[in-house]
């Protein structure tokens, strides 16, 4: 049996500027990734681009053109694979033949706010060893920098896009955070960040604390946590980079 390695990727995917890989990725993670020849990815093209960056630091064991890179199906990208509906066992055939494999997404940790859960589940079902490698996770970075409750928190994914449903969901999360002290983390596609931010300020109570972690690990990245009332007194922040939102008390 081969081993399935969960390989984190830098958080600068789709950003204009890239952070030097050695500044955000442990050397041991890059060494393992450099020797893998079989991959399961969210997107083969972005995986090749990432591996080229690794190659500049730790030469790959095989040419990029010779790597076996399987993509997760399109429906997994659109609907996710955390509900157990997609059977990923066939993707792990190389591991059953004794080859170590890597699972990678476009940014951060695979299977955390990104596809890959089905692959990890299938590996366990097939008794394939699963090894997570160290690397950046925007959720944990944002939470640690927020000053909100890090002992009790939940990541709730994306909020509804329709205005009334989104407002209802925001009020529900605010009530949960207020009553239990549980920090609520969520994300949005970068081009909709500004709309979500405006909805949060319009819907949340003034005393609720709102944290933003924008462009984390980038040179331009920042984190800030204030009451909603204080945010309203500031000019709207530029939220063009990937952003993690969190609310708490």
Image: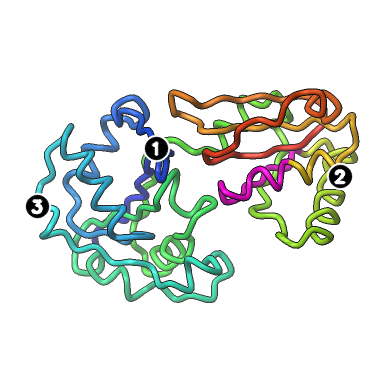
**Can you say whether 36 is above or below 198 in the image?**
below
Q: Which residue is mark 1?
A: 16
User: Magenta segment, which residues?
Assistant: 183-197
Residue receiving disc 2: 203
- Report the side of 120 relative to 67 (left or right): right
Disc 3, disc 2: CB below 8 Å?
Answer: no
Q: Is residue 195 magenta?
A: yes
| Label 3 residue SS | loop
Nearer to us of marks 1 and 3 is 1
Nearer-the-camera pick, 213 or 16: 16
Rendered location of residue 47, percent (x, y): 29, 53
User: Taking 108 as reference, is 170 left or right?
Assistant: right
C-alpha span from label 1 to label 3: 27 Å
Crowding at dot 1, Cα within 10 Å, few <14 / some 14-19 / many 20+, comes out as few
- The tag earlier along the polypeptide, 1 or 3, is 1
Q: CA distance from mark 3 to mark 2?
A: 52 Å
Q: Name the residue at 13% across, 44% down.
A: 60
Q: Nearer the viewer, residue 34 or 168?
A: 168
- Disc 1 + disc 3, Cβ < 8 Å: no
Instruction: Name the image quarter holding residue 21.
Output: top left
Residue sitting nearer the eye, 4 or 207: 207
Identity of the residue drawn at 76% across and 23% down: 234
């Amino acid at each position: 049996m081969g081993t399935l390695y969960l390989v984190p990727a830098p958080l600068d995917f789709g950003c204009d500027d890239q952070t030097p890989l050695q500044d955000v990725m442990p050397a041991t993670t890059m060494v393992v990734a450099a020797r893998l020849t079989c991959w399961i990815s969210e997107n083969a093209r972005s995986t090749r681009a990432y591996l080229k960056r690794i190659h500049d630091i730790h030469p790959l064991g095989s040419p990029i053109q010779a790597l076996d890179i399987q993509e997760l199906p399109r429906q997994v990208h659109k609907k996710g694979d955390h509900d157990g509906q997609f059977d990923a066992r066939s993707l792990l055939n190389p591991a059953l033949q004794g080859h170590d494999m890597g699972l990678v997404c476009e940014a951060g940790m695979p299977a955390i706010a990104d596809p890959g859960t089905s692959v990890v589940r299938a590996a366990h079902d097939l008794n394939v060893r699963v090894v997570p490698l160290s690397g950046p996770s925007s959720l944990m970075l944002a939470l640690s920098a927020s000053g909100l409750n890090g002992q009790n928190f939940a990541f709730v994914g994306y909020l509804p896009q329709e205005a009334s449903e989104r407002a209802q969901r925001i009020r529900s999360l605010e009530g949960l955070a207020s009553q239990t002290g549980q920090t609520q983390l969520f994300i949005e596609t970068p081009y909709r960040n500004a709309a979500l931010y405006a909805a949060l300020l319009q819907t949340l109570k003034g005393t609720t604390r709102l944290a933003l972690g924008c462009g984390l690990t980038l040179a331009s990245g920042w984190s800030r946590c204030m009451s909603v009332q204080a945010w309203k007194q500031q000019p709207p922040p530029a939220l063009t980079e990937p952003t993690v939102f969190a609310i708490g008390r």
